[in-house]
Image (cartoon, grey):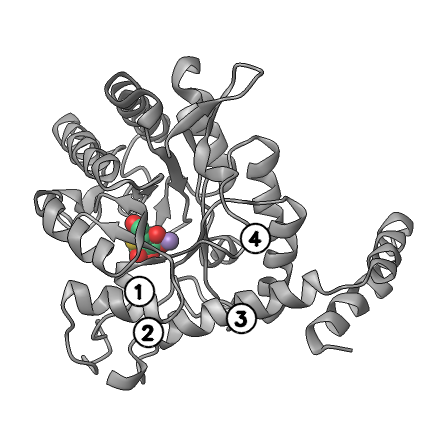
Amino acid sequence: MGFKKKESGVWVPSHLDQFELGEAISVGDWNVGPGGGRFIPMVRSELTLAGRLQAIRDAGATHIEFHSTEAPAKELKKIKQIVTDLGLNVGMVTANLFKGRPKYANGNFGHPDPKIRALAVKDTKEYINFGVAIGAPVYVYWNGSNGLRVRQGVPYTDLIKWTADSINQILHWMWDTHKENSLAFAIENKPNEPTQWSYPETAGDVIQICQMVDEPVRHLVGGNPEVCHEIMSGSNYALTLARLHVMGKLFHVHLNGATGKQMFDEDLPFGAGDVMTALETVWQLKELKYRGLVGFDVQPRPTDTDAQYAESVKQSIGRFHNLLGAITDLSDPDRRRFLGYQAKGNNAEIDKFFFDLLTGN
Ligand code: GLT
Ligand code: MN
């Protein structure tokens, strides 16, 4: 895994041309669980790590994603064994910089206190080492608590500079330490929750950070756009995939679903909430010839029973394959017809084309 040098001399993440679309399905360990939250009771029984991974694998995943909280770096040997025994691979790792420590309540890489910024950098480095040791191609930084809880809670220009600077430090350390075995560092933007205003908020902010880090380590950083987070911002997810792709920064994806009327992360199964977004997402990934990991970040429904432990994961993967199948099965004349509509700006026919594709007409 890691990075490879193209003939042009540019370093690129190796995993991005490794899989056929839909072949590598990566799911968060946190995507199954007993349920429970501020307004919801625990409804399912707790499973062990091995039990959770088995449920995710049986739902159709090939890769697993870990937080430092559920899969602590010090348990590397044990975790590696469980993953290998189940025939899985690790797709992504991410240090918990939101609930990992009480100190992160008011931010991480852009926290006003330099000691807490340094702690976030240290926690990240430790978990990158874990990711390298366990063979994960991707590291994700999700902003989490980074940002503002009140207006001017952090000086705005400093928030941006501190965040970029913390990431820059990590990238230099990673390249010096791990060279081409480095992980593809994918930044996952989200506009709010748990903050009122988060940074990085949008894919534009992710690209801003990519531009702010030093040129010799810039190849190491890109984005991990998530469907729900884009919908919360009022953005078109497929357009965001393209935004990052044209900059060479589409390092990973997190697919899920949202109704579009919520200002919080609904984390519905992929294809739930807004099925057209799901269809367009698969269409766009195919269009971009995306060959990285297809990651899912979904939560169980509060009504799911012990028999439906990984139902949200299973439905998400099933729908992805269904939609991919429908798109792949399009005949050449139908494809040409579609391109003709696009070239002429025939919006009515384009709209009908997608509706018919979805309904099998
Ligand atoms: C959390 C968040 C996700 C992130 C995870 C990785 S944590 O579940 O809602 O979008 O991808 O840190
Ligand atoms: Mn996510």
Q: How far is disc 3 from disc 2 in space, using C-alphas? A: 14 Å
Left or right of residue 252: residue 239: right
Q: How far is disc 2 from disc 1 in space, using C-alphas? A: 8 Å
Task: State the residue position of label 2.
Answer: 310
Element under disc 1: helix
Q: How far is disc 4 from disc 3 in space, using C-alphas? A: 17 Å
Q: Earlier in the sequence, mark 4 or mark 3?
A: 4
Which of pointers 3 and 1 indicates the residue nearer the eye? 3
Query: Residue at image x 59%, y 57%?
Result: 281
The image shows residue 216 at horizontal and vertical percentages of: 41, 13
Q: Earlier in the sequence, mark 2 or mark 4?
A: 4
| Residue type, numbered disc 4 | Tyr
| Residue type, numbered disc 1 | Asn
Task: State the residue position of label 1.
Answer: 31
Q: Which mark is residue 42?
A: none
Q: Quadrant of the N terminus?
A: top left
**Other-residue count near label 4 (Cα within 10 Å), few / some / many at <14 / 14–19 / ≥20:** many
Element under disc 3: helix
Q: Which mark is residue 237?
A: 4
Q: How far is disc 3 from disc 1 in space, using C-alphas? A: 17 Å
